């Protein structure tokens, strides 16, 4: 499962990228590593930075996802992995705080929805990759 998380370009939905193409995503799974995206014009986006990498156990990243980047918002995305009878259990948490003109409470449900979709895509990818 840990390796599957690192293959972000294989499971993240292209609709939730700046380039509209998930194959432009990469994730360097070590402290200081970047969850980054290449853009067609030679530009790039730093989505998150790895702050804790525990292979097979957890991955924690910091940064503001998607539209939160344009606000005074910071977030922490944590994947926790635990052995399960039939493979692995993954817990995904994204804690975000800061200032949003219209309030962060209005963004919580849409952000949770997008991340929930990505977790399903990760599960599908992980199950199909072995």
Image (spheres, helix red, strand yellow):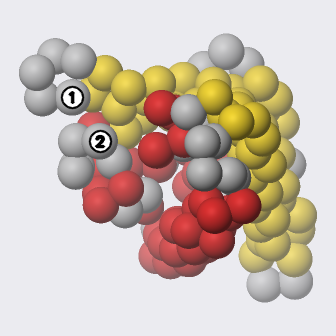
The residue indicated by pointer 1 is: 39
Q: In which quarter of the image is residue 37?
A: top left
Other-residue count near label 1 (Cα within 10 Å), few / some / many at <14 / 14–19 / ≥20 = some
Residue 67 pos. (x, y %): 46, 44
Identify the residue at horizontal 64%, vertical 71% (top origin). Answer: 109
Q: Which of 45 and 50 is in front in this view?
A: 45
Left or right of 123 in this view: 25: left
Compare residues 28 and 94 and report the one nearer the observer.
94
Q: Do the residues labelled 1 and 2 touch (CB within 8 Å)?
A: yes
**Residue 107 shown left or right of residue 114 in the figure:** right
Please state the horizontal and vertical placement of residue 23, each as a whole percent of the image. 27, 46
Outermost residue on the left side: it is 41
SS category of the residue bearing label 2: loop
Residue occupying image coordinates x 22% and y 42% = 19
Q: In this view, does 86 lie above or below 3?
A: below
| Residue found 78% across the figure and 84% down from its top | 86
Give the residue at mark 2: 18
Mark yes or no: residue 75 visible.
yes
- Residue 99 sits in which quadrant? top right
Q: Residue 110, which numbered label? A: none
Q: Residue furthest front?
A: 102
Q: Tell me the quadrant of the picture where the N terminus can be found.
A: bottom right
From the viewer's perspective, is residue 75 above or below residue 124? Answer: above
As helix, strand or loop, the secondary structure at mark 1 comes to loop
For disc 2, the neighbor class at 10 Å (few under 14, some 14 to 19, many from 20) is: some
């Amino acid at each position: 499962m840990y390796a599957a998380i690192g293959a972000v370009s294989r499971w993240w939905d292209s609709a939730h990228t700046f380039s509209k193409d998930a194959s432009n995503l990469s994730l360097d799974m070590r402290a200081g590593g970047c969850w980054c995206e290449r853009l067609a014009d030679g530009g790039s986006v730093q989505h998150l930075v790895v702050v804790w990498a525990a292979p097979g156990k957890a991955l924690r990243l910091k940064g503001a996802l998607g539209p939160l980047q344009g606000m005074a918002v910071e977030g922490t995305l944590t994947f926790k992995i635990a052995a399960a009878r039939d493979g692995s259990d993954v817990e995904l948490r994204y804690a975000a705080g800061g200032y949003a003109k219209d309030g962060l409470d209005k963004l919580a449900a849409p952000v949770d929805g997008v991340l929930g979709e990505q977790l399903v895509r990760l599960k599908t990818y992980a199950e199909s990759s072995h």
